[in-house]
Amino acid sequence: MKPIADFCGLAPKTLQRVIDHNQIPVGEGLIKLTCFLDLQGYRIIEFERLGKVLRSLAELIGFAVLSPGEVTKLISYQQTSQIYTLLRGGFSLSKEKEAKIYDLWKSKREELESKKKDALKRYRIDLTRSSDLERTKLELVERKVRTLSETNDSIGVRRLATLDIMRGLRSLLDEGLFEGLSQDEVDSLGHSDVLCIAKLSAHFSALSLRLVCDHKE
């Protein structure tokens, strides 16, 4: 399984978790894994359904022509997670963004084709000469990625989508949407509204504490 690990930039232990525990990577790791399987001739339905523009964007990242951070800046997104959400079908593509991606692909087309040809030489697995164990492992990875793509319901994907919602919520709150509430407006809030706000506050506090502690370490 060294070709997969090398192409995707995954540590052997990470790849073993994919095989043994269904811990599919998200973000850049998933894009690279999908491109690798496509290189081997496997059909990942959701990858094929992306359409030419988004598929070209995925390949620019998957074949390491551009990093996710570079793509984010070049097509004028704010966060790298928005790229991943876009490629997972989390939101639709505007005409402006579609034009930027197409222009980006045109400017990098020759480099992308060169990288794909090089990857075919270096990483293409000859299944007719592979051991039964190697074929089984590759098929397990393909099946797990395909299942993730078809269900589109992994924890990682939902986290990325939730982060986008949180950014939108923050923008609204920064505008002072709930500042200056009258007593009547406060009184009009039902018990379920108050409970929802309290639970959100608790979730955000726990997440903030975790992030602060991790950064201190």
Image (tube, helix red, strand yellow):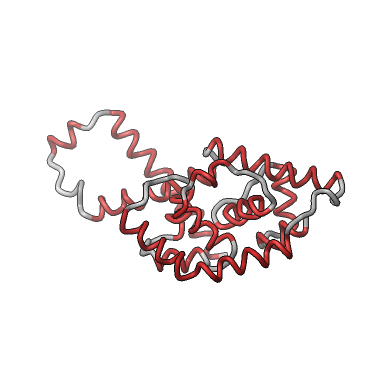
Quadrant including the N terminus:
bottom right
Count every numbered label the image shows and give the total. 0
* Left or right of 215 on screen, residue 24: right
Residue plotted at (42% across, 55% down) = 82
Residue 18 at what x, y percent from top left?
69, 47
* Left or right of 105 on screen, residue 111: right
Residue 30 at what x, y percent from top left?
59, 52
Residue plotted at (77% across, 45% down) = 137
Residue plotted at (83% across, 48% down) = 128
Residue 171 at what x, y percent from top left?
28, 54
Q: Which of the two residues, 34 or 179, is positioned nearer the viewer here? A: 34
* Left or right of 41 on screen, residue 112: left
Rendered view: 127 above or below 8? above
Residue plotted at (38% across, 41% down) = 200
Q: Which of the two residues, 159 or 205, is positioned nearer the viewer here? A: 159
Q: Which of the two residues, 161 or 179, is positioned nearer the viewer here? A: 161
Residue 33 at what x, y percent from top left?
63, 53
* Left or right of 71 on screen, residue 145: right
Quadrant including the C terminus:
bottom right
Which of the 4 image quarters holds residue 29? bottom right
